[in-house]
Image (cartoon, helix red, strand yellow):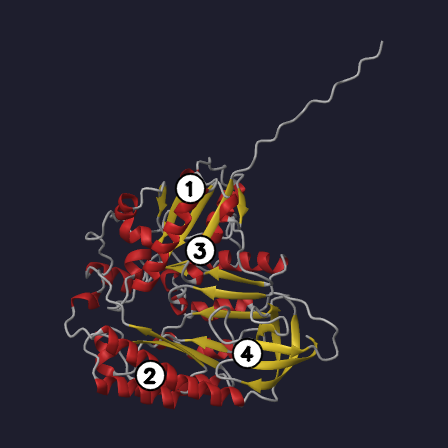
Amino acid sequence: MSVVDTPKTVTETPRLKVGFVSLGCPKNLVDSEVMMGLLDRAGAQMTTSPEAADVLVVNTCSFIDTAKQESVDTILEMAQHKSSGRAQKLIVAGCLVERYRDEIRKNIPEVDAVVGTGELEKILEAAGLNAPVAPALQPASPFNILTGVTARAEGDHRESQGRFARKEWDGANAALPQYLYDHTTPRLLATRGPSAYIKIAEGCDHPCSFCVIPNLRGKFRSRHFESVVAEAERLVAQGIQEITLIGQDTTCYGEDLGLKDGLAMLLDKLANIDGLRWLRFLYAYPNKITGRLLETIARHGNICKYLDVPLQHASGPVLKSMKRGANADIFLKTIEKVRAAVPGIALRTSFIVGFPGETEADFETLSNFVREAKFDWLGVFGYSDEEGSGAFSLGEKLPAKAIEQRKRALMRLQKGLSKKAKQQWVGRTMHVLVEGESAETPLLWEGRSQLHAPEIDGTVYINDFGPLESIVPGRFYECEITEAHDYDVVARVISEA
């Protein structure tokens, strides 16, 4: 008699589905990618549908009032899925947690857990998952040139002055965030196409009186040089062709590790990775733009000729009150140096209008500076009075109406300058990364050149495929600019690049 084994029925435990909403800056997006990577490694499954999620995570921003309001609105929106959908847990992460940890739990009872900017690994416990055993760190490579330095003198000095104080914030941990991921940390990319961010540093030591980011994210700290290189090499091997390096002040990169011109060194190393077509970094502190950094940008064809320098203002008295220093004349000399070293470079900046004590004369100084500097891209923020910032205690607060009027006036000025500058693009050819069909009409496709940073600058609209029958999102094409508008341009495809 023969024996036949009866097949056993295997019941697979359904994977926990987690939905993410990431708000705010690219630095926050990388934090979300790290948390998603940790969850994925622990067995969870990511979903883009809130209705299908067992656990919902909102990674919040708390930079200014509008960002805080957007974060709260999103939390409340996601909370509805606990009563009307399948969601069992709602987790709030990010900067809002660092500032309002207790208040969130008290005022929004639907929130089951909070995860601060320095607690990313706690996302597993919050979601009800066990953390897998972490792999051992890879040994340092022969390229490790680091010293034993672990902090910037400026950061220690600012801490002694109370720069990072959080004791008056509701429920804030006494200890500052210390977390910083490395190349062994799992990440699930949320960016589309061949583009990705790499966070090379976290925190900030600068004393800017309008800003609470140092209180939210801690002292400046750099990732190890070889760790960034290893991550970049892995991303390119996976098909990434554009990398944007991010940090609150990337131009300070490596100072806490004993490196001089660390960012220039890092760019030089990364630019030699085969297959990396575009490499850029955000953001540059004006007095940290060294000759070596500019020479490095100019020397490598795959380093984008693009520099984002948030100047914040141009009036000497306002900048002094902001604890930034410098003035319009100093900035103009810096801009002249940058353009001379890197011909054709695109310059982006941002300004705050309506800072306490800003006079009509100060605003006129700023407006005249914008006319003379002729930035390629410019953003304007109305002053937001943030509790915990140095400026919060300043007098001479401007009415909201006056702040809005100045914001609109400066953007009108930039609109005219931008339109005139973009008209000079007509007839130029440039490589364009195609991102897909336009949301406005299927008759147009959208893309950007190396002079456009992801998400924040204008758009290259493509209305003519030239000799090609079709084009593919995520690929690069040689295009000719045929029309110019206020901030955007129209192009036709010449060939695949």
| Real-space Cα separation, disc 1 to disc 4, in angstroms | 54 Å
Kindly identify the amino acid type of the residue bearing the numbered disc 2.
Ala
Residue 209 horizontal/vertical position (percent): 24, 68
Residue lying at the far left of the rendered structure:
395
Foreground residue among 153 and 2: 2
Question: Which residue does the numbered mark 2 point to in the structure image?
Answer: 409
Residue bearing mark 4: 299
From the viewer's perspective, is 164 left or right of 150? left
The first of marks 3 and 2 along the sequence is 3
Residue that carries the numbered disc 1 in the rendered image? 82
State the residue lying farthest toward the top: 1
Work out how far the residue at label 3 is from the one at label 2, CA to CA, in angstroms.
31 Å
Disc tally is 4
Q: CA distance from mark 1 to mark 2?
A: 44 Å
Q: Are marks 1 and 3 in contact (CB under 8 Å)?
A: no
Q: Residue at x 45, y 62 (%)?
A: 26
